[in-house]
């Protein structure tokens, strides 16, 4: 029951109130893509800025901002929201509909091995995924299809630099 309450609190409580994020520095670029700036305005920037990180933006955030509308129909490159390096290219090896279904099913953008820009990503022993410049991205949560990278939208909504 305690874990369920924690999950509900993470999904529905304002970040600043629940996580005590007042006064923390925002390490992210201005004017993020996909409408993710709204998540910064709600106090979730610290999700990307602090490593190791055990929190996440609320599940389903990709459906509360302009993620799918801005994505387009081809392959999209996702950039680090802090330093602008490329991190993922998707969809690769599957359709946009498959990428969308898997991401919506889990509540966060979900990438597969062939969609990683491997030179810019590190997967730590505990499964935490961080960029080469130190941005927390999410976690690797393998399933029957292989590695599945469950990534915070806010952390991959940057512009190339």
Image (cartoon, helix red, strand yellow):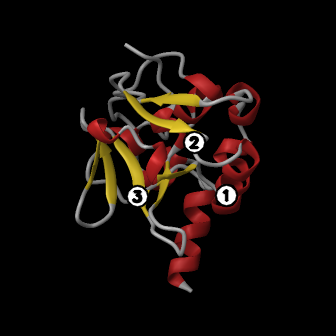
Q: Residue at x 74, y 30 (%)?
A: 73
How many residues crowd around disc 2 within 10 Å: few (fewer than 14), some, or many (20 or more)?
some
Q: Residue at x 57, y 38 (%)?
A: 90
Secondary structure of residue under mark 1: helix
| Disc 3 target residue | 139
| Disc 1 target residue | 102
**Residue 34 image offset from top left, x and y in percent:** 64, 28
| Relative to 98, 154 lies left or right | left
**Residue 77 image offset from top left, x and y in percent:** 52, 28
Report the front residue among 74 and 78. Answer: 74
| Disc 2 target residue | 92
Q: Quadrant of residue 116?
A: top left
Q: Earlier in the sequence, mark 3 or mark 1?
A: 1
Secondary structure of residue under mark 2: loop
Query: In the rendered image, which quarter contains the N terminus?
Result: bottom right
Foreground: disc 3 or disc 2:
2
> Looking at the image, how many numbered discs can be counted on the residues?
3
| Above or below, comparing residue 150 to residue 119 in the picture | below
């Amino acid at each position: 029951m305690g874990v369920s309450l924690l999950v509900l609190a993470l999904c529905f409580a304002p970040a600043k109130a629940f996580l005590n994020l007042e006064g923390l520095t925002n390490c992210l670029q201005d004017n993020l893509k996909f409408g993710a700036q709204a998540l910064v305005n709600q106090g979730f920037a610290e999700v990307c800025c602090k490593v190791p990180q055990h929190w996440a933006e609320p599940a389903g955030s990709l459906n509360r901002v302009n993620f799918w509308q801005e994505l387009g129909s081809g392959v999209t490159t996702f950039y680090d929201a802090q330093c602008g390096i490329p991190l993922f290219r998707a969809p690769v090896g599957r359709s946009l509909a498959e990428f969308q279904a898997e991401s919506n099913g889990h509540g966060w953008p979900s990438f597969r091995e062939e969609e990683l820009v491997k030179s810019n990503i590190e997967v730590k022993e505990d499964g935490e995924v961080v960029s080469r410049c130190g941005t927390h991205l999410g976690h690797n949560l393998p399933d029957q299809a292989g590695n599945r990278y469950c990534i915070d939208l806010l952390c991959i909504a940057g512009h190339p630099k």
